[in-house]
Image (cartoon, rainbow, N blue to C red):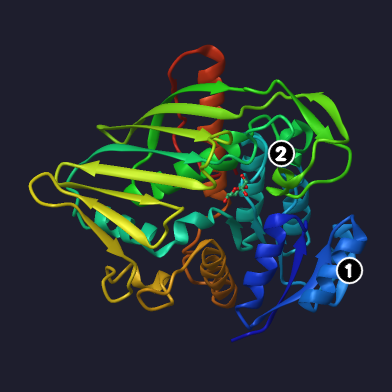
Amino acid sequence: MKQFRTALFGTGFVGRVHLEAIRRLGYVQVYAIGEPQIEKARSLAREFGAEKVEADYRKILEDPAVDAVHICTPNALHFPIAQDSLQAGKHVICEKPLATSVEEARQLTALARRTGLRNATFHNLRFYPMVQQMRRMCEEGDLGEILVVQGTYSQDWLLYDTDWNWRLDSKHNGPSRCLADIGSHWCDMAEHVTGLRITSVSADLQTFHTTRKRPKGPVETFAGKMLTPEDYVEVPIDTEDFGAVVFRMGARARGAFTASQVSAGRKNRLNLEIYGAAGGVAWDQERPDELWMGHRNSANRVMLKDPSLLKERARPYADLPGGHSEGYDDTFKQVFRRFYASLEDPAAAPDYPQFADGLRQLTILESELESHRTRAWVDVPAFQPFVE
Ligand code: SOE
């Protein structure tokens, strides 16, 4: 395998998960870390053996040794950094949401296409083995015609007005929080698994905390739950804590989902349920190795992940034998493995979500925001992956 040198920009919660998963590949070196908090970058560089740290990511882009970059910064920086990276000739993996608007995402998708560089939007949750099993069940017709698609993405880490993270500041986050951050994962998974497209949406959003108490120091994602309410400033909040979306899908299917960052006790519950004319299937990210299968005329079953029981086309997504759980961080390894393999073989069709998929999710998101604003159903514009 060719050896690749990669750079990471942004060192919050997810940046660290990227670093750990990159190292699992063996043929990809964490070469450089770009992060304005230079001490943090240095400490991670020591831990992960990176040769270079820079406060300004552009210095890293000037280095011809860098093959690819991972963009793990706050959302508002995805667009400029991805644009600069592609222009510098680097392959790009960008965290979701790809950008903060459809317009930015269109530009990035078009630029990626013009450069011919590999590009990925990090909808990693597709890569759980049991999600792939659901996908293949839909594809092979096990469920019959898909009628109803429903579920939720529920978390509780922003329940209190003392919970804080950069996502609460729309300057860094963009105009939507809950639907952009986790609703986009849900829609990406629902479309990926069913092979159907969401065609129309009716959305209702709510911001329960219209002001929040911002701690004076920096806070890592999810770490705000451990703070004591001592040193806060009260700030206005202009992004949603919750969204409910009713949608039409494909020719006849119907569905609904909620996305919530204020659901006490739900840590990271992406639940997707698909009901077809011949049976149902349901999965929950908090129990990722289990798949519920529902039947009308016989007992329901719960299948535990075991490669020998998976459908042939789902099996390559499971690395460990039955009873050996595979979780969130393993999905990163699965994406990176496919992404870097595609660098080695320029002719290979990409088998991971690309910028076009990030654009797709922003298109759905903007339709949801418009629906909420106008209190009306909104048709999701047809999938146009790029503008020339
Ligand atoms: C925070 O809500 C977050 O870390 C998301 O940004 C991730 O994409 C999701 O996987 C878990 O929750």
Report how many numbered discs are placed on residues in the image. 2
Q: Decide: is 59 above or below 341.
A: above
In the image, 226: left or right of 93? right
Q: Position of residue 211 (x, y in %)?
A: 75, 22
| Beta carbon of the mark 2 residue lies under 8 A of ligand 1 | yes
Residue found 57% across the figure and 22% down from its top: 206
**Amino acid beneath label 1:** Arg
Q: Position of residue 210 (x, y in %)?
A: 70, 20
Kindly indicate the quadrant of the structure image that contains residue 365. top right
Residue of label 1: 42
Q: Nearer the viewer, residue 290 or 192?
A: 290
Residue found 35% across the figure and 59% down from its top: 290
| Mark 2 or 1, nearer chain start | 1
In the image, 40: left or right of 354? right
Residue of label 2: 167
Q: Position of residue 366 (x, y in %)?
A: 56, 29
Q: Decide: is 307 above or below 387.
A: below
